[in-house]
Amino acid sequence: MSDKPIQATCDAGCKKVFSINKLKTKLVKNGIEKTYFRCPHCKHEYIAFYASQETKKLQKKMRKLHGSVKEMDEQTLATLSKKETELKALIKQSMDEARRIVEREE
């Protein structure tokens, strides 16, 4: 998350506006982490995402891919763009699966 706070409205709780300064992370089960924030007024919890070890591994690949983009020709960039699209889909699948695992057993 950036250093600049994000403005949010507690649309599922008290309807008040607040700033999100930092996301919180909590280990929930089976090695899955929940990343979330709370409304400081009514304490309603908003889940940003769940991440398994697989999700983190895929995200690390994505960061590495982005770091390699600096000075490349168009063909190489096109190949990397395709890899990025594939990684995004895999990360989404991994996060969705982590959510199903956590929420199925709650």
Image (tube, helix red, strand yellow):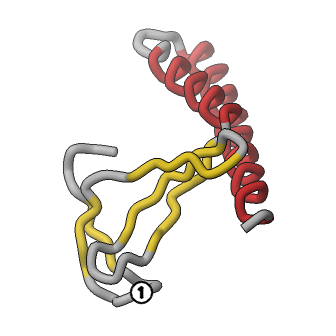
Image quadrant assignment for residue 77: top right
- On the image, the x and y values in percent for residue 13 come to 42, 87
Q: Name the residue: 26% across, 68% down.
A: 7
According to the image, label 1 marks what residue?
A: 13
Image quadrant assignment for residue 89: top right
- On the image, the x and y values in percent for residue 98 come to 72, 50
Count of labels in the image? 1
- On the image, the x and y values in percent for residue 11 come to 42, 84
Please identify the quadrant where the C terminus is shown: bottom right
Furthest-left residue in this view: 4
**Left or right of residue 18: residue 36:** right
**Left or right of residue 55: residue 22:** left
Please identify the quadrant where the N terminus is shown: top left
Above or below: residue 101 compared with residue 94: below
Above or below: residue 9 compared with residue 49: below
**Left or right of residue 6: residue 103:** right
Q: Name the residue: 68% across, 29% down.
A: 82
Q: Name the residue: 46% across, 85% down.
A: 12
Furthest-bottom residue in this view: 14
Judge by depth and name the residue closer to the eye, 104 or 11.
104
